[in-house]
Image (cartoon, helix red, strand yellow):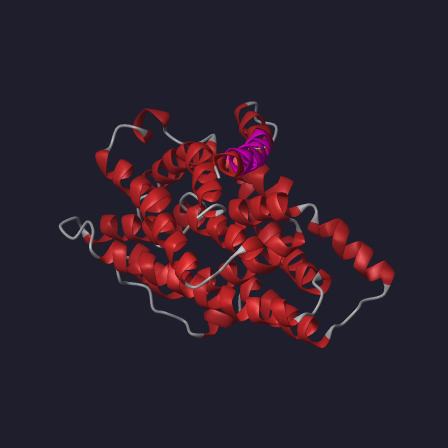
Amino acid sequence: MLNDFLSNLVTVAIQVLILYLIAGIGFVSDKTKIFVKADGKSLVDLLFNIILPISIINSFLSMERTPEHIKGLGMAFLLAVLAHLLGVGVSCLTFRKRPRMESGIYHYATTFSNAAFLALPLAESVVGKEGIFYSACYVAVFNVFAFTYGINQISGGKAKINVKNLFINPGSISVIIGIPLFLLGVKLPDFLSDAMNRVAVCNSPMAMIVFGTFFANCNFKNIFAKKEIYFVSLLRLIAIPLTMMFVFKLLGVEGTMRTALTISASAPVATNTAMYSAKYDNDTALPSELVGQTSILSVITMPVIVALASII
């Protein structure tokens, strides 16, 4: 068992290191003014609206339609909902005495992982296209919770929830398109399949380069100065993923699905925490600090959590 743990630990750690090395390109590019955070924000729109949806749809098209995968699809959605409900439940018990806007940031950061820009590329690196298949379910559920509970929290309760946005967003639309294609066993012509594959492979490196530009703008003096940020790191990187890991065990979830969903649940604070804070006139420094610390610590915590999940 120890050998299996160490082997999985090394495998995941190498993939995490590779992704963060790619993020280092974005970090250096920002510091040298070649490709700065403002450019990254524009590229986020391309990633979120075009490249990520194509990658998700492509993962559904590439999966063989088997009873195991069909059952796994439903289970992945259920587990993703449970993971977010756990995040909501935990966050609601914390930071009650803080101002509403500040507590909203902490609640958002605790609940939402960097599922699209880090977990999905990492799941692909560790377990291949099947990892995207299950991680896509997590991203879809992420969007539903982010456009409801998330926006409510980060706006201090001021933003009105638009039900249309629950389904009319790139992440949800790509899953809505992808599931019927998977269930019907649709096969695209080779030229279309090849084109989608070529676009899909851009998702991981581009997402990490953009992440690097955001990371370059963190206030590193404050990242490790606030005890509240350490507490969020404890919840986001250890408590929530460990709890979900045992839920997976109780429900008999194994193999690729468990690995992919553990990666999604154990990822650091979502990069869009700062973006939503800016959009809803909240503080942007604190979200950057939360993303920064949890991203640094996740280099250690994610490989350990994923390796543990593979042996329990």
Region of the chain picked out in magenta, as a range: 6-21
Q: Report the residue at 61% width, 65% height from top.
A: 174
- Left/right placement of residue 185 relative to residue 132 reads right
**Which residue is outermost to the front?**
1
Can residue 265 be seen here? Answer: yes
**Could you tell me residue 22's position as x and y percent?**
60, 32
Indicate whether residue 269 is drawn in magenta: no
Q: Report the residue at 56% width, 54% height from top.
A: 255
Residue 179 against residue 155 in the figure, above or below: below
Residue 126 against residue 88 in the figure, above or below: above
Q: Report the residue at 27% width, 53% height from top.
A: 104
What is the tally of numbered marks visible in this picture?
0
**Which residue is outermost to the left?**
97
Residue 289 against residue 193 in the figure, above or below: above
Can residue 281 be seen here? Answer: no
Image-quadrant location for residue 59: bottom right
**Could you tell me residue 244's position as x and y percent?**
38, 55
Image-quadrant location for residue 305: top left
Indicate whether residue 20 is drawn in magenta: yes
Q: Report the residue at 31% width, 62% height from top.
A: 152
**Could you tell me residue 200's position as x and y percent?**
70, 51
**Could you tell me residue 183's position as x and y percent?**
67, 75
Please tell me whether the stretch drawn in magenta is mainly helix, strand or loop. helix
- Left/right placement of residue 251 relative to residue 193 reads left
Q: Front-most of 303 and 213? A: 303
Q: Front-most of 52 and 4? A: 4
Q: Front-most of 55 and 37? A: 55
